[in-house]
Image (cartoon, rainbow, N blue to C red):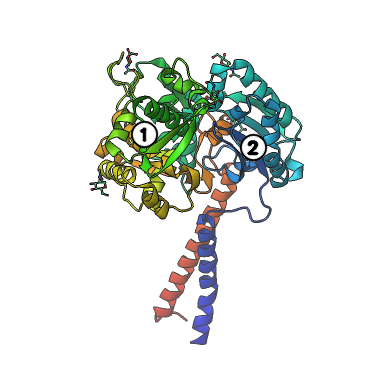
């Protein structure tokens, strides 16, 4: 009996070895022997209200894989956006020093030289370039001078077009969610069936909507063709200047001063002194600017918690009366019907998140978003302060922000209940912030190839197949041996 068990041992061991080998080959491998070398890239996102620095990292050996680049760290620059230094350009450069010093520590010293560094400015600088091209040029020169003092591979400070801003936000979201391409466990690339995700960004001075569309845009300014991983994408995009959150608030303030002696979007019990110069200095409030006004005088304005009047004030920001195309969103801008799922990030997220978490209201449907907005706009100042004691100076403006978001989505972009069901609001995908910055860097460093990459397992794919066959043969041999022994044990003629 013992001999019989002993004779079964070698084939069993063989089978175990074969099985183990096969299993090991099927487990997704990680390079444990030596951690892969990392590369880094830095993008300064110079927005209208503030500048953020993002440091990205990726393993060099997997450079063209989707979803491989992630956020290493980030830093918020103290003070206002670089466009607020129009009268003191060198201050704009100096404001970046603290975050750049952090970058020196966050990126390993031996990688400094090979780390690309970009600064992209958005709508705040677009506006400054409109009012004073000279001032915007000197701000860019000042930040360039500062950035070249660092050991990184500085590749320029630029003002992004609204179109670029929209498209790079769309690229970022779909790259992070692996909607362009994925690979299966044997290392073959395939195109996920779920399609791409539309992107909606709400900044301080502009807002962008970008989504894949089947039909050509009637206005070529709204269409971008992209070739990513061997696939052609036709993308609709538009950026509305002066429709960012801060500029909308200034425009509503100007409208309130013009039409009422109170602010219907501010809560009852809240009042403040408004400096006219602050309201009218932006090109976005130009149309509402009185012929003569004392720029250093202040006007006392108080809130009235009036949802209906607030809504009509917000609706006054949109012009639906003319359209040169078969269909428009507003202000005579062409837009096809919204299609597919969407992600709303930046201030879209913050606004909806306030309704959800601070107000405790559901916003899963268009109707719920509308009801939540009306409830928020009907609160008194003391009720609001009781709910959000730590919210600070922005608390009085959440009603106006929510009303704008709700009207922009429903009336402006034309989301109905069905389309709104496909919208999610989020600021990050994994650990990486969703915004234009990552897409911008991916494009400028050529990290997204135009053509489909070759087999991912590349060099070790051949040996992987040989090992697979070897272990399979091993397993087969063991099974054959086992069967033979089992038969010989049963057979009475066996000796
Ligand atoms: C400022 O605007 C002008 C006119 O649109 C444009 O030609 C120029 O490139 C802009 N400046 C920058 C730095 O982008
Ligand atoms: C403008 O307002 C300031 C402060 O209210 C006042 O001191 C000044 O005299 C005003 N100037 C004119 C021209 O009205
Ligand atoms: C809307 O736009 C049209 C065309 O640009 C313009 O004629 C009209 O005055 C605008 N209406 C409002 C209320 O601004
Ligand atoms: C606003 O609140 C008052 C009482 O607090 C309530 O009677 C009214 O119906 C509310 N209006 C809206 C539009 O929610
Ligand atoms: C990305 O970069 C390429 C050049 O490498 C350029 O042709 C293309 O237009 C860029 N994509 C976008 C969306 O700007
Ligand atoms: C990534 O793609 C680019 C352009 O398609 C190519 O030149 C480069 O060698 C690729 N890198 C890797 C690691 O495959």
Residue 415 seen in this snapshot = no
**Where residue 111 appears, x then y in whole percent?**
73, 41
Q: Which residue is more in the foreground, 434 or 444? A: 434
- In this view, the residue farthest toward the top is 324
Read off the residue under disc 1: 262
Q: Quadrant of residue 328?
A: top left
Q: Residue at x 52, y 78 (%)?
A: 7
Q: Is residue 136 left or right of residue 330?
A: right
Judged from the image, the secondary structure of the residue bearing numbered disc 2 is strand
Q: Which residue is drawn at 51% across and 72% down?
A: 12
Above-or-below relation of 249 to 488: above
Q: Which comes sooner in the sequence, label 2 or label 1?
A: 2
Above-or-below relation of 235 to 466: above
Q: Which residue is more in the foreground, 254 or 366? A: 254
Q: Which residue is more in the foreground, 243 or 33? A: 243
Judged from the image, the secondary structure of the residue bearing numbered disc 1 is strand
Q: Quadrant of residue 484?
A: bottom left
Read off the residue under disc 2: 42
Above-or-below relation of 7 to 91: below
- In this view, the residue farthest toward the bottom is 1
Q: Which residue is drawn at 33% across and 45% down?
A: 376
**Where residue 116 appears, x then y in whole percent?**
67, 33
Residue 184 seen in this snapshot = yes
Q: Which mark is residue 473?
A: none
Mark 2, ligand 5, within 8 Å: the answer is: no
Mark 1, other Cα within 10 Å: few <14 / some 14–19 / many ≥20? some
Q: Is residue 376 left or right of residue 171?
A: left
């Amino acid at each position: 009996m013992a001999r019989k068990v002993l004779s079964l041992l070698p084939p069993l061991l063989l089978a175990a070895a074969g099985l183990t080998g096969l299993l090991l080959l099927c487990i997704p491998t990680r390079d444990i022997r030596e951690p892969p070398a990392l590369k880094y890239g830095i993008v300064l996102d110079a927005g209208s209200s503030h500048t953020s620095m993002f440091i990205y990292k990726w393993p060099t050996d997997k450079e063209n894989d989707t979803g491989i680049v992630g956020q290493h760290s980030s830093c918020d620059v103290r003070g206002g956006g670089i466009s607020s230094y129009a009268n003191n350009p060198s201050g704009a450069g100096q404001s970046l020093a603290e975050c750049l010093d952090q970058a020196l520590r966050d990126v390993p010293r031996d990688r400094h030289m090979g780390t690309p560094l970009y600064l992209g400015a958005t709508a705040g600088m677009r506006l400054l370039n409109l009012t004073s091209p000279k001032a915007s040029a000197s701000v860019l020169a000042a930040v360039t001078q500062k950035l070249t003092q660092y050991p990184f591979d500085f590749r320029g400070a630029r003002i992004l077009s609204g179109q670029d801003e929209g498209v790079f936000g769309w690229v970022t979201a779909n790259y992070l969610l692996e909607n362009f391409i994925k690979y299966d466990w044997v290392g073959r690339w395939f195109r996920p069936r779920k399609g791409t995700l539309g992107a909606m960004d709400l900044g301080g001075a502009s807002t962008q909507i970008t989504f894949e569309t089947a039909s050509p845009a009637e206005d070529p300014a709204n269409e971008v063709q992209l070739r990513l991983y061997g696939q052609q994408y036709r993308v609709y995009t538009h950026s509305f200047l002066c429709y960012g959150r801060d500029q909308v608030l200034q425009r509503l303030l100007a409208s309130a001063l013009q039409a009422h002696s109170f602010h219907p979007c501010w809560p009852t019990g809240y009042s403040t002194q408004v400096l006219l110069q602050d309201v009218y200095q932006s090109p976005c409030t130009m149309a509402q600017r009185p012929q003569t006004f004392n720029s250093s005088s202040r006007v006392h304005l108080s809130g009235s918690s009036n949802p209906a009047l607030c809504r009509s004030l917000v609706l006054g920001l949109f012009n639906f009366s003319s359209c040169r195309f078969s269909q428009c969103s507003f202000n005579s801008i062409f837009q096809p019907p919204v299609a597919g799922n969407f992600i709303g990030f930046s201030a879209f997220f913050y606004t909806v998140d306030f309704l959800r978490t601070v107000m405790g209201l559901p916003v899963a449907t268009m109707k719920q978003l509308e009801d939540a907005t009306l409830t928020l706009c009907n609160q008194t100042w003391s009720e609001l302060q009781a709910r959000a004691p730590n919210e600070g100076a922005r608390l009085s403006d959440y009603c106006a922000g929510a009303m704008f978001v709700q009207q922009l989505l429903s009336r402006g972009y034309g989301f109905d209940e069905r389309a709104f069901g496909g919208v999610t609001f989020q600021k990050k995908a994994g650990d990486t912030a969703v915004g234009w910055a990552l897409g911008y860097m991916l494009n400028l460093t050529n990290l997204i190839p135009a053509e489909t990459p070759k087999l991912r397992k590349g060099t070790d794919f051949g040996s992987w197949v040989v090992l697979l066959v070897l272990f399979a043969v091993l397993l087969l041999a063991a099974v054959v041996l086992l069967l033979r022994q089992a038969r010989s044990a049963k057979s009475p003629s066996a000796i």
